[in-house]
Amino acid sequence: MADLDGVTITGAMAPRYDEVLTADALAFLATLHRAFQQRRVDLLAARTQRQNAIDAGALPDFLPETADIREGDWTIAPIPADLTDRRVEITGPVDRKMIINALNCGAKVFMADFEDASSPTWANMMDGQVNMLDLWRDEIDFTDDRGKDYKLSDDPAVLLVRPRGWHLPEEHFTVDGEAISGALFDFGLYFFHNAKKQIDKGTGPYFYLPKMESHHEAALWNDVFVAAQDYVGLPNGTIKATVLIETLPAAFEMDEILHALKDHIVGLNCGRWDYIFSFIKTLQAKPDYVLPDRSQVIMGKAFLRAYSQLLIKQCHRRGAFAMGGMAAQIPNRRDADANSQALEKVRADKEREAMDGHDGTWVAHPDLVPIAMEVFDRVMPGANQVGRQRDDVTMSQAAMLEVHEGQKTEAGVRDCIRVGVQYIEAWLRGKGAVPLYNLMEDAATAEISRSQLWQWLKYGATLEDGTTVDRALFDRCLKEEMAAVREDVGAETYDAGRFDDAIALFTDLSTADSLSPFLTLPAYRML
């Protein structure tokens, strides 16, 4: 590994990390950090200021100061040919087997995820970068310990990479004594090593950008892209990005986000699970916005329906793609009836998206690719639906904040506890994509689980049977559910895991006086 003034690496060095952490790459990361760290810090502070204003009585709304952008007649830059058909996308972590299987599964796009589907251990992040190097060197093929060969097909999916959000640091890499942003670390290393190789292969450096809360944060990404392209000698606009709209504040600034990134953006995506969490978090001080059980907060109704429709309208008006959300179901090979019901839910969800005008959708498992593909092939015979304008859509602030109707149940309490704790436990062991109860869960799962319980506890929500959600109920359900989990996974596995740590963190977050912005920040210190 090379040394560079001002750069300190405290993460353990493993074989081949020196191929990623070269002197030139370190210099690039240091340049990005020094140029953009203060703006990042200021923008995170602005998030807190906006949250304080909402807590004090304000509500999220469309910005009066950017009305000219929303009313203006402009479009984004042209979209590369290999991104024009994205009807089915699959996502997953950046381990080697996943990369090959996802690229080969028949989906149009694979999003290699350094963010919510990956626990951000140093080894996971660095091994992912090594795998990206090998992919673009045509050296990704491998044989596993059982002798099974994994080889890339002749027609793999187009690759997009998702770096971490602006809020997460990479504590193992400091510049001038400050931890670098996880976003800049992930983006910087991948872009620096692979962008020109991708262009040589007829594609390009394409990204998914998560967790933004304002168009100012999008403008920061745009300036990072401009600086990065200039640094390595690529034309402006070479980088292309899709932005996940997965926070409530960002949903009121979708036009502005498209405008801030108009030279580099190709679309927006409905990040539905994080959006539910953000709805709870943003409106945490307002008892009128308490949600029912997570299972009843569905895309076809209330605030989720409103934001997905508005996203389609605004994207298509600007010549951008409107990508649908995740189908998290995974096959249930032990229960044919349950499996059939789950797949039918996926089909119905994808038909709603395609009929509304989405240009593509996400799935979490290769077995769902044919289902989603059939729906979009049938409803969307062209490469996309960008030409379909949704001028019939008009969304008010009230529609964007409409709460789902539904019940709050003890089963919902128990589901939040059981799923939230098990996900955190796996995350602390380095697993970011976790199959639980026939769903592929990522960090958004635990965020919804702990924030919903926090909301119900804070406002003493009344359950369907008349029970009040209080600390005694929480403690009783937690004890009983963890006993059941221990029996399900086996005492030896349970006791060897990190359940004590996960239970403690989940309890602290769910019962705290105030709602922590992200569970991944305190959890990161426990890795």
Image (cartoon, rainbow, N blue to C red):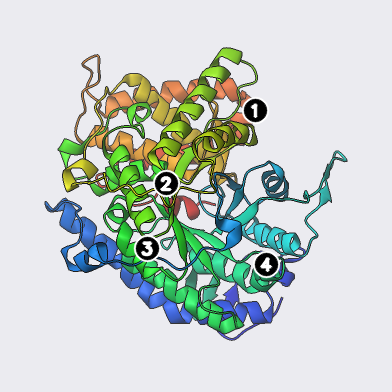
Q: Check disc 4 and report its element: helix, strand or loop.
A: helix
Note whether 453 is above or below 129 in the view shown: above
- First in sequence, mark 2 or 1: give its number: 2
Q: Amino acid at mark 1?
A: Glu
Q: Which residue is mark 1?
A: 492
Q: Residue furthest bottom?
A: 5
Q: Residue at x 45, y 38 (%)?
A: 354
Measure the alpha-carbon separation of dots 4 and 2. 27 Å
Q: Which residue is mark 3?
A: 258
Give the camera-side residue of 373 and 524.
373
- First in sequence, mark 4 or 1: give its number: 4
Find residue 28 and report its horizontal and vertical position in percent. 58, 80
Contact, CB < 8 Å: mark 2 with mark 1? Answer: no
Q: Check disc 2 and report its element: helix, strand or loop.
A: loop
Q: Amino acid at mark 2?
A: Gly
Contact, CB < 8 Å: mark 4 with mark 1? Answer: no
- Tag in front: 2 or 3: 3
- First in sequence, mark 1 or 3: give its number: 3
